[in-house]
Amino acid sequence: MDHRNKDGLDAEEVGAAEVYLSLDGAKSWKRTHTDELMINSVIGWYFADIVVDAHDDDEIYALGVRLAHSKDGGKTFEIVAGDVYHLFPNPADPLHLDQCEIWINPTNSSHIALANDGGFYVSYDKGQSWMHYNNIPTGEFYDITLDKGTPYKIYGGTQDNATVFGPSREWNPKRQDGWQYLWIDPWSGGDGCITVIDPVDSMTIYYSAQEGAIRRMDLKTGNSKPVRPNSEKMGVELNYHFISPYFLSEFDNRELYLGGNYVLKSENRGDDWKVISPDLTKNGNSNKTSLAVSALVESPLEKGMIYAGTDRGLLWSTPDGGKTWTDRSDGLPDAYVRSVTPSKYQSSRVYLALSGINYDDFNTYLFKSEDGGKTWESLKGNLPGEVAYVIKEDPIFENVLYAGLYRAVYISTDRGKTWSQLGQGFPPAAVSDIEVEPRSNDLVVSTHGRGIYKVNLKPLYELLDKKSINEEMLLALGNVTVLPAERFDKLHNFDLEKMTISFWLPEAKTVSINILDEKKVLQWSKKIDGRKGLNQYRWDLILRENKSPLPYFLNQREFLPKGKYTLQLVGDKTLEKEFEAID
């Protein structure tokens, strides 16, 4: 059967979906419709599922870029859109695109749950209206950037949810998260990729969508300008990866660099571009022939020392801003270069993380070079067999490294010889990026699927400064911020940052944590089964809970007021630290 449209193109060529029906157990099939079902695009493989109503075999839903609904066994379809309401305020108006999963209540066909690239939606009227449950932390971040504000904000590019930014404080899912869109496309999404903040002018930022689509934005006005290079104007054919790497030089904030199949440079913030490299996608080894540059970075110690990695394990370096390039890929696997980290301690030292997951290779590829990439040493050590995505240096301790893998964050205190999983409570999600905020010493980690997490490194730094760790230690405290007393009658409108209490135990044991006021009167106590090593307890600052049957009773929770306190750790001995709670 020929299913060409009026222009002579078949369904695949126009990106259409097709629905077929079998009435004999799949021995034969017949297409149900004559009109093209235009709910798909070139990414039709991404979804293309069909669900049948349990009460009516002729009522079906077809998943694609859009959601299609048929009441006549697939002969005709209508697009499901409907009015969208959000659990928390959100500027995304229409039903998000790219439908991934649908569930129809088997006892109530009007009750539908839909999962798409915008999140989780529920309808009780077959899609005429939807509630968007936008309090679920499922952000698929590609990359994060921290600004220099006080407090600092986090910028991140997300899969089909644009580029967003928000506060670095802990999020309470009962409250609006405080994050905003830097931009959003007309379909309430769009892929956000990499954000760069001008190191001199913090009101100028750069953000990108897929395949090198960079824009420069003035945060004062909210206006943005596209600065993606024009291949015709430059006289070269340019290829890009979906996530195209680019950076603004820390040595000159007007110099913008972008990686495609060539490395491109602008000396006026993206207004004009020039090619500064040969084609970096091939070096004569057919196994390493690539599409484009996948990682691009400049040394923090030497202006013009640039590294460019590709999707098939090519690694190039230039010491002079692109005048000469050298292949440094000897000894590297034919894998996707995900992260290049030139050292801030030695100009000849560089770290690499490569991923083979695109090629069904699930080995752990982490490397270090002490000679600018001439030779490479594997840093896999005792890491589990997980794909690696990112490796970063600690900004204070030269021998401390952080690695983001497929299921966790790992730390090494001996520059990659041995590794330990960092902390508890981290979801088993792919780690896409790691940054350290230098003033707060927060380690900020983005995941591709479970949002963003942070942990403060001050307790770790204190341990690293110790000559011996064979005794109990009460470690550094962060700032403890409480609510002013006059706000205690409005607690339902505010959130408090939890107090992180860190301590080291040479062996597992039960300890007590006590909070004493300025007069040494006990205000709060908690017994904890401590583990061997570094422990943390995050206290919600609730001193006690008061209950009453009275109908207008308020202040059911009594919080720590501002003032001076003593924190005690009671184990084999009693350790104390003074702290002040401020509002």
Image: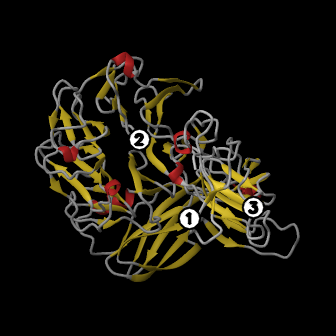
Q: Is residue 424 left or right of residue 344?
A: right
Looking at the rendered image, the disc whose residue lies closer to the viewer, 1 or 3, is 3
3 or 2: tag closer to the N-terminus? 3
The answer to whether the residues at label 1 and label 3 have Cβ atoms under 8 Å apart is no
Tag 2 residue = 243
Tag 3 residue = 59
Q: Residues within 10 Å of mark 3 (few under 14, many from 20)?
A: some
Q: How crowded is mark 1: few (under 14 residues within 10 Å), some or many (20 or more)?
A: few
**In the orientation shown, which residue stands out farthest toward the right?**
551
Percent from the top left, x then y, of residue 563?
59, 58
Secondary structure under tag 3 reads loop
Amino acid residing under circle 3? Glu
* CA separation in Å, label 1 and label 3: 70 Å
Secondary structure under tag 2 reads loop
In the picture, the disc for residue 518 is: 1
1 or 2: tag closer to the N-terminus? 2
Looking at the rendered image, the disc whose residue lies closer to the viewer, 3 or 2, is 3
Secondary structure under tag 1 reads loop
* CA separation in Å, label 1 and label 2: 54 Å
